[in-house]
Amino acid sequence: MSVPSSFYESLKSTYSKAIDSGDLIFTPTSTEYTTVDDVSYVYSVIPTLKEKPQGIPKADESTEEAKEDDSKPFDPFDPPSPPLTVLSDYANDYAVVLNKFAVVPYHFILITKKQKSQASPLEPADLKAAYSLLRETNKQSGVRHVGFFNSGLNSGASVDHRHIQFIEFPSSKSSEYVPWPDKFVKPHAASYKDGDKPISAPHSPFFAHFLAPVDTTTKDEDLADHLSFRYSTLLSRVLTSLRNSSLPPRTPISYNLLFTEEWLLAVPRTAPDFIDKEAGVSIGINAVGAIGLLLAKGDDELRYIKEKGPVAILQAVSLGSEGGPEDTDYDY
Ligand code: AMP
């Protein structure tokens, strides 16, 4: 089943009902815009983040039975909560639900109906379903969205049931915020071919990242192949850069994949949180941090982020400059 023409209307009405019933938590946020080294950043204070579970849970501790059976990790998407469900059946194998701990209004999630691992690579059908949902949401809402996938223990993932999240970009009606990949992808969009090396911005931002344009003219029937080819190029770079890094052996392979209609961006991750032991600070860094959207749980955390600077924080949870572009003939 394709995306219904009423999807965005359903998303909004399900959201309003879930807020009224208390099934969904969203606290209005304060937002500040800034630019560092030509990269746009948006700082948001999101108290809701304090409620969100951290890390992949070991077991469902919400019931007495589950406490006894600690072999079964808690899975909030099996089944998804009915008041949060927007589409119970999409593209055969998927459902769409609202994020219970929304970081922006209408924060939604594509989930697989069957339990599948979040640490495994995305499949062609996942990529097609996610991209089609993003494109249709942009069309129906008139607002540009970004999708993101957190994979691996260091990526910030907290649920081991395959899911891809979507939020709208901030201030999409003004030019205060421009995601930095837009600028770097544009000159390559027409000439980039399957098999080409991913694009890396030469200087900013200063952490390892791999970018590929999406050919927006791709026909529906070719979308799964097109996206898979470009994603696998990025993924092989992620694997190569993690392998070549000085991380201890057996560090889990972790990365964030972010995508818009125009590009795919992969960022290898080395830690889920930014930690400053001396200052007693631990800040969970969300995938969208990679495109400059930095989310703080409170005013103190925001003050710390601003003082430390976004680049130092993002470098500390990724490969920093050590995983930058290098000239190898093959990856992984
Ligand atoms: P991640 O942390 O990247 O694995 O994404 C999982 C998302 O699921 C988080 O952003 C949570 O806020 C969200 N979440 C947790 N429990 C539920 C639930 N019961 N229903 C919907 N979303 C949830």
Image: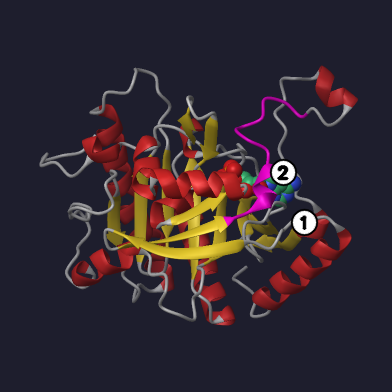
Q: Quadrant of residue 20?
A: bottom right
Q: Looking at this view, is 187 or 271 the one in front? A: 271
Q: Quadrant of residue 54?
A: top right
In magenta segment, residue 280: no
Density class for disc 2 (Cα within 10 Å; few <14, some 14-19, many ≥20) is: few
Quadrant of the image containing the N terminus: bottom right
Q: Residue at 66% across / 30% down in the picture?
A: 57
Quadrant of the image containing the C terminus: top left
Q: Residue at 75% across / 66% down in the picture?
A: 15
SS assignment at label 2 = loop
Along the polypeptide, which appears first: circle 2 or circle 1?
1
**20 displayed left or right of 100:** right
Q: Residue at 67% across / 56% down in the picture?
A: 102
| Residue matched to label 2 | 51
Q: Quadrant of residue 263?
A: bottom left
Mark carried by residue 24: 1
Residue 62 x %, y %? 83, 31
Q: Which residues are magenta?
A: 45-60
Q: Amino acid at mark 1?
A: Leu
Q: Residue at 47% across / 53% down in the picture?
A: 288
Total labels drawn: 2
Depicted 200 relative to depicted 324: above or below: below
Q: Amino acid at mark 2?
A: Glu
Depicted 182 relative to depicted 245: above or below: below
